[in-house]
Image (cartoon, coloured by chain):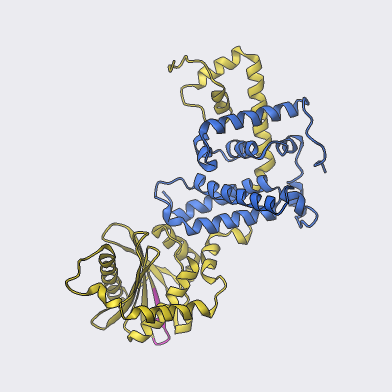
Amino acid sequence: MTGPDRPVTEEELHAYVDEQLDPGRGQAVERYLRDHSEAAQTVAAWAAQRRQIRASLAHWSKEPLPPKLDLIRLVESRLLRRRTRWPIAASIVLALALGGSAGWFFAAGQPVNRTQHAMSVLGQQAIATFMVYANDPHHPIEVSASEREHLVQWLSNRLKRPVVLPDLTAAGYHLLGGRLLATERGSAAALLMYENATGDRLGIVVRPMAPELKAPQTDVSERAVNGCIWIEKGLGFGVVAEAPDEAIDRISDLVRAQAKEAA
Amino acid sequence: MPGVLTRVEACIPALRRYAVALLRNPQDADDLVHDCLVRALGRLHTIRDETDVRPWLFAIMHNLFISQLRQAKLRGNTAPLSEQTEAASSLSPGQEAHLQWGDLMRGLYTLPEEQRTVLLLVAVEDLSYADVAKVLDVPIGTVMSRLSRARERLRRIMEGEAQPPLRRVK
């Protein structure tokens, strides 16, 4: 029997107590309880248990959260966690080792695979984004670095990844803020804009890619704009500026090391 | 639908309540929730727009809790965490008061772990039976039978048919 008159099951008595009963069965269960006083007592006892346990624990979901459970702080601290010189040194060695083979990505005549295509899209977006926004005197960013927590939360929400804001003070750049970018697939990417003491700007483009993608650092350039792009754990990075290659390389190493620590 | 980080953030108070209920010690509970959040942040990219993050987070925390229990057993330490740390605990008086639980709560801790977790997830955390099955990675029929046994045992305890062991009473 599946109609409204089918017999009431024990599962349904639990569901009645837990407010998970199928809509339309409420009347049948209530009628059953009116006719069966023992079952009604049992259900009343279960409901009383439920109320008491909830009341005993209620306090713990109302107490203010301790700082160690502040989610935005956790996202940020994934970046700051125990930083040593070694990962940076190691990544420089790795970059040097890979440098020689990086050019093949854009070599003519090669069949285009997914990674090549992803790198090409990433490179174009990084350069184009920088050209448009770095030269905007009024609104290079949407959210300023002074609202750091909001920026992290907003971008992480939209990119569905913990977005870290790399610290580039070692290279003389400070964070201005960030903005959301659209990709051709209708997903979200981000631009983080930095500036140095002389007002030169540098952009970091962060773009979620397919999770299995990975590609070593590759140089890109267009007119005066130079950049480095790479994909690590399905996250594409582009570091772009009107700056010499060596400066970009050094900053890319900083970004990569910090992103790696945060992952 | 709000962004994934916002949705995760909204679940933290409930995760904390569940962790306190499991461990009966706020410091251990905060450690567990902390580890759960760190792990969740590392897997945020597996979450789709329409995913309900609540059962997902509870599942991560449940798995961490189970591996903690297993490690404690390996160390030959089978007493509940709360008893190990009770002497050294530095609870505020307010927190202390909120762990002064009545007979029913003491009865809850005489139930087998697997029954207690089902009852807590259903009755306190308002997870659907199907979600509890996912969190614990057991069939839904197992969830229902554990729930039924938990409630019946508690009812008998409260009616005085079976006295809970008194050694844990403060």
Is residue A104 one of those drawn in magenta? no
Is A169 above or below relative to B79?
A: below
**Nearest to the observer: residue A216 or residue A38:** A216
Tell me, yes or no, whether the highlighted magenta stretch contains residue A197: yes
| Residue placed most toward the observer, A119 or A71 | A119
Q: Position of residue B13 (x, y in %)?
A: 59, 50
| Residue A232 figure quarter | bottom left
Image location of residue B151, percent across then percent down:
65, 29
Outermost left residue: A109
Instruction: Using residue A12 as the reference point, say whether residue B85 is left or right of it.
Output: right
In the shown orientation, is residue B88 left or right of residue A236?
right
Rendered colour, chain B: blue
Of the pair A132 and B145, the residue shown nearer to us = B145
On screen, residue A208 versus residue B19, left or right, reads left
Evaluate whether residue A139 shows in this view: no
Q: In this view, does A193 lie above or below A50?
A: below
Q: Main secondary structure of the magenta part?
A: strand
Over which residues does the magenta segment extend?
A193-198
Instruction: Check the image and report above or below for B143 versus A129.
Output: above
Q: Position of residue B91 (x, y in %)?
A: 75, 55
Q: How far across and how far down the image is residue A90, in percent?
A: 47, 78
Image point 29% across, 57% down: which residue? A186
The quarter of the rendered structure image containing the C terminus of chain B is: top right
| Count of marks placed on residues | 0
Q: What residue sits 49% from the left and 21% below the top?
A: A25
Q: Can residue B125 be seen in this view?
A: yes
For the point 52% across and 80% down, the residue is A85
Residue at the (51%, 55%) spot, across then down: B40
Kindly indicate which chain is depicted in yellow in the rendered structure: A
